[in-house]
Image (cartoon, grey):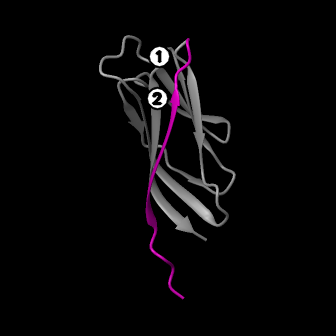
Amino acid sequence: MATPDPIPLDEPASVVLDGSGNGEVTIGPTRSRQVWNVTSVAVRTVQDDPTNEAQCRIFVNGRYRAGTFSGSSGDDTDLTVRLGRNNKITAQWTGGDAGVRAEMLLTGWLELE
């Protein structure tokens, strides 16, 4: 039996930064037999001209894996990680502009086991 081709992964998640310009969003596979092969994590805030440039730290299952000083204007990492069910990636913004939406986008490949 042939192995099915991987499906492109393009998973967004967002949060509105609190009054201190901080926020956190967590995302990962939720279905059994689903595996996310993440090849890039992009972060940014949705605003035209940030006053405060947020820092963003990326965690995989609670462990720090990457960070950026451009969490507002946009940045991405070449973080590669394989996530099974109950595995999560978290983006944590600090020091941004209060009340703006912060976004994380995971790209890579989705497999069904």
Of 47 and 73, the residue lying toward us: 47
Do labels 1 and 2 touch, CB within 8 Å? yes
Q: Crowding near pointer 2: few (<14 within 10 Å), some, many (20+)? A: many
**Circle nearer the N terminus (1, 2):** 1
For image coordinates 46% across by 27% down, the residue present is 101
Mark on residue 102?
2
Q: Nearer the viewer, residue 78 or 86?
A: 86
Q: Which residue is mark 1?
A: 96
How many marks can you see?
2
What residue sits 63% from the left and 45% below the top? Answer: 88
| Residue 39 picture location, percent across and down | 45, 50
Residue 40 placement (x, y as % from top left): 43, 45
**Residue at x 50%, y 49% (from the top left corner):** 80
Horizontal and vertical percent position of residue 53:
41, 16
Residue 21 image position (x, y, % from top left): 52, 15
* Amino acid of disc 1: Gly
Q: Is residue 27 above or below residue 109?
A: above
Asked if residue 110 lies in the magenta stretch, the reply is: no
Q: Secondary structure at mark 1?
A: loop
> Is residue 7 shown left or right of residue 88?
left
Instruction: Label 2: state its secondary structure.
Output: strand
CA–CA distance in space, label 1 to label 2? 9 Å
Residue 3 falls within the magenta-colored stretch? yes
Residue located 49% across and 77% down the image? 4
Q: Where does the magenta region start and end? A: 1-19
Q: Badge 1: how crowded within 10 Å, few (<14), some, or many (20+)?
A: many
Mark identifier at residue 5:
none
Tag 2: amino acid: Ala
